[in-house]
Every structure is written in structure tokens, then in C-alpha cells.
Amino acid sequence: MDCEDLTTVIVSSNGTFSTTSYWDFGNGCEVDYLATGTWENLGSSVYSTTEDGDTFTQEISFDGNEMYFDFIDEGVIYTDVFVRL
């Protein structure tokens, strides 16, 4: 299993979220990043998230139990997919 597949995002109806991501630094999967913050639905599938005083705005789409959003890393567009458990 790829360590990135262990990444979790918990989105709560009270407008808060938490994220835990994992990476293999050579000793198996380890926590790479922890974040907590707030989120807001701005309409038209656009959401803002705020963590550590920084606010990000992003289009997020939903299909059944899946949440999708794109991000760009070094000019390459990736799509993250999270499945509701």
C-alpha cells in the first residue's frame, strides 16, 4: 500500500476539518503533515479552508461518497480523491 493512501481528511458539519497525511521516509509509513482548521462553502462548488491564519479557496466536487479536488505540483495537475467511510 502506498503511504499516501493512508491520508485522511475529516470534515465536520460544524465548519472544522483535520488532515493527516503520511509518507514513507524509509522506515515505513509515518505522519508527514497534520493540519486543523475551518472550512466554508462559498457556493458553486467553491470552498475556502483556513489553517494557521492562511485561507485557501478551491473548487471541490462530490460524487456519492467521493470528494474530488485538483492541485498543481511543478506544473502537473493532480486530482485527489477521498472516499467517505
Image (cartoon, grey):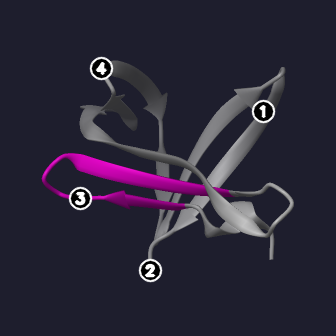
Location of mark 1 (residue): 77
Amino acid of disc 3 = Ser
Q: Callout 3: few (<14), some (14-19), or many (20+) C-alpha neighbours within 10 Å?
A: few
In space, the residues marked 2 and 1 are separated at their CA atoms by: 26 Å
Amino acid of disc 1 = Ile
* Magenta: main secondary structure: strand
Of the numbered discs 4 and 3, the one sitting upstream in the chain is 3
Q: Are marks 2 and 1 in contact (CB under 8 Å)?
A: no
Of the numbered discs 3 and 1, the one sitting upstream in the chain is 3
Residue 37 percent coordinates (x, y): 29, 39
Location of mark 2 (residue): 85
Q: Which residues are the magenta region?
A: 8-22
Of the numbered discs 2 and 3, the one sitting upstream in the chain is 3
Q: Are marks 4 and 3 in contact (CB under 8 Å)?
A: no
Q: Residue at x 35, y 21 (%)?
A: 55
The local secondary structure at tag 4 comes to loop
Location of mark 4 (residue): 53
Amino acid of disc 4 = Gly
In space, the residues marked 4 and 3 are separated at their CA atoms by: 19 Å
Q: Are marks 4 and 1 in contact (CB under 8 Å)?
A: no
Where is the N terminus found, in terms of image quarters?
A: bottom right
Q: Callout 2: few (<14), some (14-19), or many (20+) C-alpha neighbours within 10 Å?
A: few
Q: Residue at x 45, y 73 (%)?
A: 84
Q: Are marks 2 and 3 in contact (CB under 8 Å)?
A: no
In space, the residues marked 3 and 1 are separated at their CA atoms by: 27 Å
